Image (tube, rainbow, N blue to C red):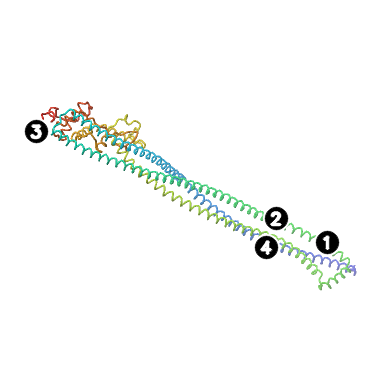
Amino acid sequence: VKPTRRDKKMSKEIDLSELIELQKQKEQAAVEEKLKAKMRRQIRIFNKEKSMYTRRTRYEISKQRRSLQILELERDVELDNYIATQSEAIENKYKKEECVVRDLVHTTDDVRGLLTKEIENTRILDQQVRELEDNKWKHRNVVTELAKEFSKFRIPSKTKMERRIEWASGKYHSQLYKNKELQDKIDSAIFLRDKYIHEEVKLVKNLEDLNKTVTLTMNETADIYEQRDRAEGTKLKVREHLAKVKDQYERELLNISLSINDDKKMENFMRTKHKDITKYLHQKREKELKDVTEMINRKDEFTEAFDVIKESTGKSDINQIVQDFIEAEENNFGTFLSIGEILDTNEKIRAKIRELRQANVRMEEKNLDTLAEAAINHQNSQQKIDLYKQKSETCQKRLAEQSKILDEFISNIQKVVTLLKLNKNSLGDLVEKDGSIKDRNVLAVMTIIEKELSDHMKDYYMVELSTRAVIRAKTEFSSEEKMLTRIPSFRIGPHTAPRVVPTNLLKEKEDIDEVKNAQLMNHDEARDFVVKSMLEKKMGASVRQLSHEKSYNDLPWMKKPEAKQ
């Protein structure tokens, strides 16, 4: 059967619809490829921007980490320096300086004690001057009484009277000489009193200076402790500041990580959006296919509409017109959305970068200020430490010199103790078991040694002085004799005035007559006479050893008097 015209027309329409459908499928595939390429390009651009942003953020984070490491190192260095300045060595030095201050306080107490002793010595010297004046008047009264007694018991003769006149004139001149000596002693006592007063004023002044130095050192130590407290406060402030900075950087890192998570969420959102768009386009295509089928059924309307579109657009191909419209619409919509999102993200990133830069600048300025203040404080503390080192070294040198002198003096005292062979009972607790002597017991040991020496040499001194008294026919002592016969006292100390021990030789009438009737004697003969008189009066066993080898019959005053030479 031959196909009819209608069949041919229907077949042509079917072929045309298939061709249109195939053409639409091809165009749809091309559109999908273009959309996929566009999305790939957008994703590639987004990935590049994301990688650039991540690189920048990583660079900023690494930079901030490096700055944090530098700050931590500087903090550790500052803490080490501060700990070094406040180490145990400096604490020991402060303790040594406190010991020096205590020694100064003890020396002030010793100076006060010496002042009291010097005042007592001046009082004793005044008392001795008064005693010397009383002895002078007593001696005058004794001389007048002796002269009266001699005048009663003896018959005056011309020669005797001349001798008495000569003797009286000699006594008068000797008394004048004694008075002169007493006046010299009084003048020397007055001079010593003035000297002691002057020394007292000096010592008081030195005491005031020592008190001032002690107060200054105490104030300086208080200032040093205050500076140490301030440095500890600054250290705590720096620690708190660094902790705040660390917390701030951690918050910023957290924000950056959150922004990265937001970017990932944005990527997922774009993928879902792409799926929605593709779904929407697929639905739209289906709708368009339905519309095309309707348009095929209503060809006349389609042709009319196509003519209107041709007239409005100036294009004859309807597929091209539809494709251009769809592409333009989709491009506009996609670009609008992507541009808005990219602009928002860019603004956020720029705002964060600005905040980070401002915070970094503020942190650098604060760190510079804190470092400058710490350097100034460290320099000041170092200068004060050097100054106190110099002061402590000078004090240690002085203490070493004084301790060396004191050790030499104590060693000499120990040698004297060993030479004298003193008993431990006499020394008591003043000497340790190993034979060492403490500083506080030196004066007491010296007084014991002086007393022991005076006990050993007392008899010899008495014999020698009595011999001189026999030769010179006097009973007074010179200044040297007073120093030889002085007895030390524990109560007053070694620097006391001499205590005179008068002898009763030549006080009795028989001794005076015997000396006057005897011939001229030399020193040995006079000493023998003194030994004899001391033996007769039972002066002690120690004086017997000093007696001369001659017997009493061989003494010159036991023989008959011969003619004077």
**Does residue 542 appear to the left or right of 489 in the view shown?**
left
Identify residue for label 4: 45
Instruction: Look at the picture and state if 90 lies above or below 523.
Output: below
Q: Secondary structure at mark 4?
A: helix
Q: Quadrant of residue 304?
A: bottom right
With respect to residue 77, does 427 lie above or below? above
Say which residue label 3 marks: 563
Q: Secondary structure at mark 2?
A: helix
Q: Which is more foreground, mark 3 or mark 4?
A: 3
> Residue 265, labelled with which disc?
2
**Marks 3/2: CA–CA distance:** 153 Å
- First-in-chain label (1 vs 3): 1
Residue 312, position as x, y percentages in the image? 83, 72
Residue at (67, 62) in percent of width and height: 45
Q: Amino acid at mark 2?
A: Lys
Q: Which residue is mark 1?
A: 287
Mark closer to the chain start, 1 or 2: 2
**Kind of residue indicated by mark 4:** Ile
Asked if disc 3 and disc 4 are in contact, CB closer than 8 Å, the reply is no
Distance of label 1 from label 2 (alpha carbons): 32 Å
Q: Separation of disc 3 and disc 4 at Cα?
A: 157 Å
Which amino acid, mark 3? Ala
- Judging depth in this view, the residue of 511 and 387 nearest the camera is 511
Chain-order first, disc 3 or disc 4: 4
- Horizontal and vertical percent for residue 564? 10, 34
Q: Is residue 152 visible?
A: yes
- The N terminus lies in quadrant: bottom right
Q: Position of residue 399 (x, y in %)?
A: 37, 44
